[in-house]
Image (cartoon, rainbow, N blue to C red):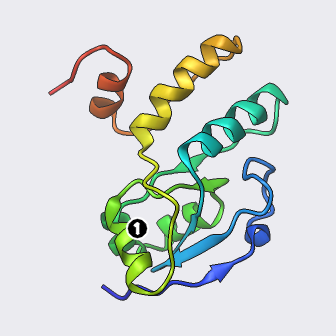
Amino acid sequence: MNISTQWLPASASSRTSLRGPNVTRIGVGHALIDNCSSEQVCAWIIAHAKDRGTPAYVLTPNAQHIVLLEKDRRLQDVYAHADLVIPDGISLLIAARLYGRSLQQRVAGVDIFKALCGHAADADLHVFPAGRPARLSGACGQGSQG
């Protein structure tokens, strides 16, 4: 796997205001990872929803995504247009560190989803998950589907 890292300004994607101000993006392979904390991600998403911002999507890459991004042009396009790309896999933090960069923390998608459900209920907002149904159903408290 060919992994490279680089510092890029937050303005690399101009699609939405979902990403917070002054967020550094770090390149790992073909993915630009937003260097942020779980708390920041939740705050940005809730603020965006309260402001009735344009529809937005968040990606939660791991090492498998980085490998797939090497050759999958459609997946590269999905990543290029993502509103927020958060480091779900611990391997992304390790890869960044190996190349002299540092990501704040692992921001697990399932943990963000759980936190957002609580914040959304407090803010009278609705949550719509998209992703792997088995993992999401466990996060929703409905048990695991086989």
- Residue 56, x across and y down, in percent: 68, 43
Task: Check the image and report above or below for 28 versus 57.
Answer: below
Q: Using residue 84 as the reference point, say whether residue 144 is left or right of it.
A: left
Q: Residue at x 34, y 38 (%)?
A: 132
Asked which secondary structure carries label 1, the reply is: helix
Q: Using residue 124 as the reference point, say whether residue 53 is left or right of it.
A: right
Can you say which quadrant of the picture contains the C terminus? top left
Count neighbours of disc 1 (C-alpha within 10 A) and say few if under 14, some if 14 to 19, many if 20 or more.
many
- Residue 4, x across and y down, in percent: 46, 87
Asked if one can make out residue 61 in the rendered structure from this viewpoint, the answer is: yes
Q: Residue at x 52, y 61 (%)?
A: 104
Task: Check the image and report above or below for 13 versus 105.
Answer: below
Q: Residue at x 58, y 22 (%)?
A: 127
The amino acid on which the numbered mark 1 sits, given as a three-letter code, is Leu
Task: Check the image and report above or below for 17 versus 68.
Answer: above
- Residue 14, x across and y down, in percent: 81, 63
Location of residue 25 (image quadrant): bottom right
Residue farthest toward the right in the current orientation of the protein:
51
Q: Using residue 144 as the reference point, say whether residue 79 is left or right of it.
A: right
Asked if one can make out residue 128 in the rendered structure from this viewpoint, the answer is: no
Q: Residue at x 50, y 73 (%)?
A: 102
Task: Check the image and report above or below for 16 versus 34.
Answer: above
Q: How many marks?
A: 1
Location of residue 62 (image quadrant): bottom left
Q: Which residue is mark 1?
A: 93
Of the pair 108 and 134, the residue shown nearer to us: 108
Can you say which quadrant of the picture contains the N terminus? bottom left
- Residue 144, x across and y down, in percent: 21, 23
